Structures are given as structure tokens and as C-alpha cells.
Amino acid sequence: MSQPVSHQVDGLTRFRVDFAYDGTDFTGWAKQPGHRTVQGELLAAMTTIFGETSNDFGMRVAGRTDAGVHAANQVAHVDLSDAQLKRLGRSNNIVARLNTMLSEEIRIHAFDPAPSGFDARFSAIFRRYRYQISDNFAPKDPQQMRYVLNLTYALDPVAMHEAAQQLLGLNDFASFCKSREGATTIRDLKRIRVKRNSQNMIEIELKADAFCHNMVRSIVGALIAVGAGKATKDDLRRTLERAKRIETYKVVEPKGLTLIEIGYPPESKLGWQAERSRARRTLDEA
């Protein structure tokens, strides 16, 4: 664990946690009574090291993934008191201790003091996801079954990519999101790319300031319809402009989806970005 100047929050020291997980057998990120979740596993391991907590160590994550969704690079923060830190004793290798306690489905990459102003969720400026599809042009690899959507028909990635460009920019993505009370569905989709990779699988990569609930899997479902010749790019544009949730396209399975990157601004802008992100968004920003 490195020793930069730590970020104090209400007398607590904030730490940035970088980690990855295979989401197949988890009921998503957020802890739920009676269910196995990524957060639940992390909290159990941290409690063993640092003792009981009344507020889950103030843990906040950059992106709350759904059941079955994976993460190659996820970020969270936790706030620890001096008393909790003293429980480490002479050993400060938190990464090794956590990885010893956790199942191999979760791996901690780093656990370091956070810079001033850092908030894992609100300081983030973008999230990047990748969805993988094996259509009938791609070989079916048993070792990839947990991470790829398998289809028995052909898709046209060129048509899918062209249609995807209709969704770029700051828009109300209500047509592609599962609504949550009090939550906005306005997002800035910065990049979306569809291509075949070297294994002949179709990869759909999306980068946005943030994603609302089911947004990525809904967009992928719409693009599959385009790739199969059942919808056009104009259909996607009309769906977006409707800004109202109608089950036009299937929300695809979570197993093909992986969170691959969280982006943050320079350290000098972390606090400013966090305050900006907390403000409710409107389309007037365009």
C-alpha cells in the first residue's frame, strides 16, 4: 500500500479500492439480505480485518453492476477511522489479506489512500463497457460461455455500428432505461463502436459519463435487431426520441457485459467533478 497524502473525510481516511470480478454467480454489486453479492463479500472481508461497521465503511462504487455483469476494472472508496487502521498491526498489505479472504471470483488490485476530493462514484467522468456476442460466424468456445452471448444466427456489425451512431451525444435515454424514482435518464453517450474481433466475435463498446439501469443491455438488444435485419438506424433514432420506456427491443442477458474502465479527471479537479455530478442533469447542458 503506497503512502500519498491521504484524504480526510470527517476525521476518517478515505481509500480508493481497485478490483475486478466475475459476476456470474453474484446477485449484482449491491448487498442484499439472503443473496450473494460483490459488495456483501467485500464488506465481510473488510469487517474481518477492520472490525464491525455501522455504515459499511462509507463504501461507494463507481458503477453498480446488475446480477451476472462482470468487471475488469471497478473502483470503490471506503472511509476508515484511526482505530480501524490500527487493527492492521504491523502488516499493511491490505490487498494480499483481502485476496486471501475473498473467493477467486473477486480480485483486489489496489487499496491506496485517496487524493483530496476523490469520490469513486461522483468524481468519475466516464464509464466504459464492452458487450461480446458470438453469432453463427464465430466459433463457440466453452471457456467463454460465461462471458459471451451466443446466437444461432448471423449479425451485420457494419449496420449495427452505423445505427449505433444515432445514439451519440447528450440525450434522454428513457426509452432504453428501467426507470427509478427520482433518477434522471439523461446521459452523455460519448462513444459507441461495433466490430468483429480477432476471434470473429462481435464486440460492442460503449463509453458515457454514466449509464442508467439496463441502458447498455437495452441498447445492445436494439443493435442486435438491426444486425439481424429486423430494425433500421431510423428505428433506433425514433425510439431514442420517444424518450419513453416501451419494450420494443429485448434486454439481452447480462453475461456478455463487462465494465472495463472508469475514468477520472486530474487530481486537482476531483472535488469539482464530484460536486458537478451531484447536480441533477438537464438537456439544457447541450
Image (spheres, grey):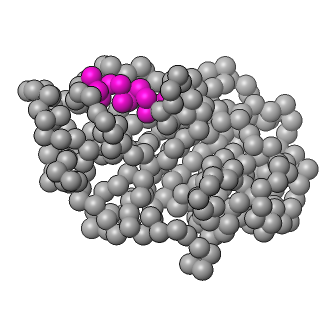
Residue 118 relative to residue 201: left or right: left
The image quadrant where one finds the N terminus is top left
Instruction: List x then y, in percent, for residue 105.
Output: 46, 24
Q: Residue at x 85, y 51 (%)?
A: 248
The answer to whether residue 162 shows anywhere in this view is: no
Q: Residue furthest left?
A: 90
Q: Position of residue 37 (x, y in %)?
A: 50, 29
Q: What is the x, y in percent for residue 208?
A: 56, 59
Residue 43 forms part of the magenta stretch: yes
Query: What residue lies at 42% left-to-right and 53% top-to-bottom?
Result: 121
Whether 203 is drawn above or below 276: the answer is above
Please tell me whether residue 99 is drawn above or below residue 259 in the rendered image: above
Q: Is residue 78 visible?
A: yes
Q: Is residue 136 left or right of residue 77?
A: right
The quadrant in which the C terminus is found is bottom right
Magenta span of residues? 37-48
Where in the figure is residue 28, as x and y percent of width and height?
Answer: 55, 34
- Total residue callouts: 0
- Splitting the image into 4 quarters, where does residue 79 fall? top left
